[in-house]
Each structure stands twice: as structure tokens, then as C-alpha cells.
Amino acid sequence: MDAGLTLDGVGVRFGGLVALDDVSLRVPPGRIVGVIGPNGAGKTTLFNVVCGFVRPAAGSLAFDGKPMRPKAHRLHERGIARTLQGVGLFGGLTALENVMTGGRPRAGFVSALLGAPRSDSDERRLRNEAYALLAEVGAADYAHALPATLPYAIGKKVALARALAARPRLLLLDEPAGGLGADDIAELAGHVRGLSGRDGRPCGVLLVEHHMDFVMDVCDEVVALDFGRVIATGAPAEVRADPAVAEAYLGVEP
Amino acid sequence: MRVLPGNTLLRHLLIAAAGGAALWALTYQLELYRDYQLATAAAYLCATAGLTVLTGLNGQLSLGHGALMAVGAYTVALSQDKWGILSLSLALGVLAALAAGLVIGLAAARLRGPYLAGVTLAVAVAVPAVTTTWSSVFNSDQGLPVALDPPPGTLALEQWQAWLAVGCALGVLVLLANLTRSRFGRDFRAVRDDETAARLAGIDVARTQVLAFVVSAAGAGLGGGLLAVLTQSVSPGAYALSLSLYLLMAVVVGGLGSLAGAVWGALLLVFLPDLTHQLTVGLALSPGAAQRVEGNLPLAVFGLTLVIVMIAAPGGLQGLLRKLVPFRTITPLPKSEERPVSDAQRT
């Protein structure tokens, strides 16, 4: 059985445009896999396939050896969490409530409607977990602030904490370093490297990022996409040295 | 320092009991006509409380809550005619509105913004047509009488009606307050703010929207049923499109998404027409002109109030009150000893 996420020969078309073509990759537990490529290479489409926002026309997906046809709201219970490009927080909820939303509630409708102790204790648990996560990413001081009032870097941290609240076994990070300064990127790199085993279970990470230094720094493996095809895959140093990757980015003739 | 208990149900029941006791005492002091107005406000409150949860917290705009009130009202009328057991009739009214809300909610979950408003608008417009089409059951424009047993003992009817309506409204408020402070309230707001992020957080968006619709429909059904009991009649004219619009205006003026705002809204619905009535009496017009002015003045005053509130206090009356009185309930934090030390504090 292959633990973690497996994509096998995935193809996606939007009309006549080939967004992904025969893409295969693996994200085993505990590994950090980075996806790079120029704009329009299919990175976000790849994420959307894993999240069930886009149905692939070809190929298959599996998680922990079981085939999966992802539905976005079902990923959470399987231990798959994703952050969105930018910040993507709920604007009307405080930072703490945002993180609580990412948690795993247990109370049912009736106990919530009656305000039963079961619902109360569930809320208390979610709140404590959320607060601990905010402290872990260094945003505890902003627990009661609304997202619009947060500095951008703090908003990204809250979004990360919300994804972590799902206790993910696979974490998808969509441009986690986008718009951050050097100090914040270094701090983020520390968080991403420390993800695996933080709650005693290995967590695989699949991330899309334009910031090359960050990718080369944190990833165990890098997959380069161009026009929807995998053009290189391997350790960061190998992929960086690959002439096909340089060509994709710079348009250099080989 | 904590004055109120941490247990949600206990806290809300205490507040409701205090409010209920005050209003109970008040019903003895008021004239019977005022008791009747209080009862009417309480009946409206059942509907506005549900609507403010739906529109304010879940972001679904409904122009059809007047129709859901009609569903509750007609069910109560029919059930009273057949069985004459008031508690059963009100329960059936809630159930019928719940079922109607489920059907509309299922459609609503697939629609957004103006399209959703359009569908709910169609429902509101359909009420007179339905009563005419099945006139043997609903007696078309004439409507139905609501048979009531006389109130127990020597109690005046109006006072008894006030007790009934206030009791029901407090029950609705307690349940909705519980719900909005639970994870479901948070899920409602998350879906309103960002559907994609909500999905990724494991929230079934469509289910959450249907749930919000059904919950608010149940409130509207109870409110409609109570109105039927108060007026002792049901007719399509009383549940026209304007009622739906009034309800929506009431929750916006009161403060969208706030249950306290729904209380202000319900009070406005009853007392603004009363105020305009006093005004037209004071104007000393000819009988014909007075009738025309009185028919339209409430609408004008309500519209004007809406415009002024939106400009001066976009958060509604409740939002204004919160700004003036710096009292805020915030989610209590974990106690300091169990509060994890943040990185900043550590270094």
C-alpha cells in the first residue's frame, strides 16, 4: 500500500486548453514536495484536482492506497487540509474563530440548539486547540482581531493555523510565502519543516510556490511543471540544475 | 469576573426568565390594547429572529418569509378548525413552515444573490394565488377564521395572548441564541464569508444553507401561527409581499445578524404604524385623505427610517447601541494558567 497522496496520469482540459497532461506524483507522509513552474503551468489546477474543485478527465488519485474522488468538504475528515492563495480568511470571524472553524467539531445539531453541555465542552475544546495553534504560529496576540485588521503576514499565519486545526496528514499550501518578507519567510520555513510529527503523526506537504529560495530550502522533492506536463522531478538541487527547467522559466534554447 | 454562568443553556434561560418575568408583570400594568400590541411584536419577533440569522449570519436573502408566516398561519387555522388544540396547532404550523422552508431552502442552496431573492420573491407573490386556486380549503381572499377557546379563568383575552406570544418568542430567542453561539452559528458565518474556504474547512456548504433556511422558516411559521391566533383570522392580504419586505426592513434597521436587533425590528413593526396613526390623527385631514395618508405613511416612514439608519448606523439600531454603550461580550479565552505562552512572550 502506498501511504500518502498518489496521482497517476492525471489529465485536465479546459476546452481546447490542456491544463494538466499525464501528471503523476507522490507525496508520502513526512515528505515535503514542492511544485514549481511558470505562470499557467498548471500548478493551481493540480491543487484544484486534489481538492475536488476540478474533475480530472484522465488518470486517478489515491490517498493511503485507497482510490479517491475528492469532494472538497470531505477532505477535511480524511485529514487533508489546504490553504488558499493570499489569505482566504472568513472576514466576519475573529482570528480565533477562523482557526476554530478549521477544527473537528463533534457536537450535533440538537445539542447545539439546546445549548447542551456537550456542545459547550466541544466549543471549549475547539477554542483551546485553536488558541494553542495561534500561539504556535505566533499569532496569539491577535486572537480576537478581525482579519481585515491583521497585518498580511499575521493573516497568513492564521490561515496556516486554520489548516493545522484539521490535524492534517496531508497539507496543501498554495503560495505560502507569497507576499511575505524575508524574516517571515524564514519563520514560515521553520514551521513547514516542523509540521511533520508535531502531533506524533507524519504529515505530507504539497506546496506550490514561486519563491525559489524557499522551495529549495524546505522541500525534499521538487516537481517542475510546464504547460501542464511534468518536465523534471527530483531533489531540489537536481531540478534546479535541469536545463529543461531553466528553459521553461527563461525561454533559453537548449 | 463572571456574572452569568458559563453553561450556554443556563445563561440564556436566565436572561429569558428575567425578560419573561418583567414582561409578565408589565402585562398587568398595560391597557389591553397595549397588551395586544406586545403580543403582536412577540409574534413578529419569532419571524425576525429567524430571518436575521438567515440573512445576517448565513448571507441568504429571503423576500419570502411573509409567505412562510402564511404557511404557519393557515396551518393553525385549519388545525384549530379540525381539532381545536392550540398547542398542537402551533406545533403543526411550525412543522408545515419547516417543510416549506426545506423545499425553498433546497432550491435556495443552489442560488446566489439576486437569483435567490427572485425565487423567494416568487414564493411571497404566490400566496394569494394559492389561496384562490384551492379556495375550497383556503377560502380565497376572504380567508379563514381561527377558532379559539376562551382564555383560562378571568384572564383578559389580550393579556393571555401576550403571555402566549411572549413565551413562544422567548423560546425562539433562547434556541436561536444557543445555536448562533455554537459551531453551527460559526459555520453559518463562515459560509456567508467564503464558500471555498468553508468547503476546505470541512463544511458542507449546501447543507449548512438548507439548515439555516429551515431553522429560520420554523421561526417564521411560529410567528405566523401566533399572528393567526392574535387576529383570530387568516387572509392572504395579511401575508402579502409587503409583509416580507417589512420583515426584511425590520431586521436591517434593527441590526442584521443580531438577535437583539431582531427585537428592535419587531418593536418597530408594531409601533411605527401606531406612530403614523397618531400623526395622521393630529393632522386633522378630511376622512378620505386621512385614509390614504394612513395607508401609505407607515411605508414612507419605514423607508425613511431605513435610509437614515443605513447612512447613520450601518450596523442598525443594535450596532449603534453597541457603539454608544461600550459593553461587549467576547468569546472567553482559556483561563490564564491553561493559556499557552506565545513565542513573543517567551523571548
Image: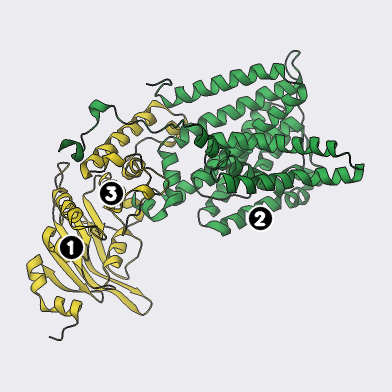
Chain colours: A yellow, B green
Distance CA(mark 2)–CA(mark 3): 45 Å
How far apart are the alpha carbons under marks 1 and 3?
23 Å
The residue closer to the viewer here, A232 or A83, is: A83
Which numbered tag is attached to residue B181?
A: none
Mark 3 = which residue?
A154
Q: Which residue is mark 2?
A: B122
Q: Chain of mark 1?
A: A
Q: CA distance from mark 2 to mark 1?
A: 51 Å
In the displayed structure, does residue B66 sit left or right of residue A87?
Answer: right
Q: Is residue B290 or residue B47 the one in the foreground?
A: B290
- Residue A79 horizontal side relative to residue A247, left or right: right
State if disc 1 and disc 2 touch (CB < 8 Å): no
- Residue A1 is situated, as x and y percent measured from the top left of the image, at 15, 55
Circle 2: element type: helix
- Front-most of residues A238 and A200: A238
Is label 1 in a helix, a strand or a loop? strand
Q: Residue at x 17, y 41 (%)?
A: A199
The percent position of residue B293, horizontal first and vertical second, equals 83, 45
Location of residue A111 with respect to B236 vertically, above or below: above
Q: Is residue B74 shown above or below B155? A: below
Q: Which mark is residue A34?
A: 1
Name the amino acid type tagged 3: Ile
- Give the residue type at disc 1: Gly
Between disc 2 and disc 3, the foreground one is 3
Chain of the residue under label 2: B
Foreground mark, 1 or 3, reads: 3
**Residue B226 in view here:** yes
Residue at coordinates 71% horizontally, 34% vertically from top-left? B271
Q: Residue furthest bottom?
A: A253
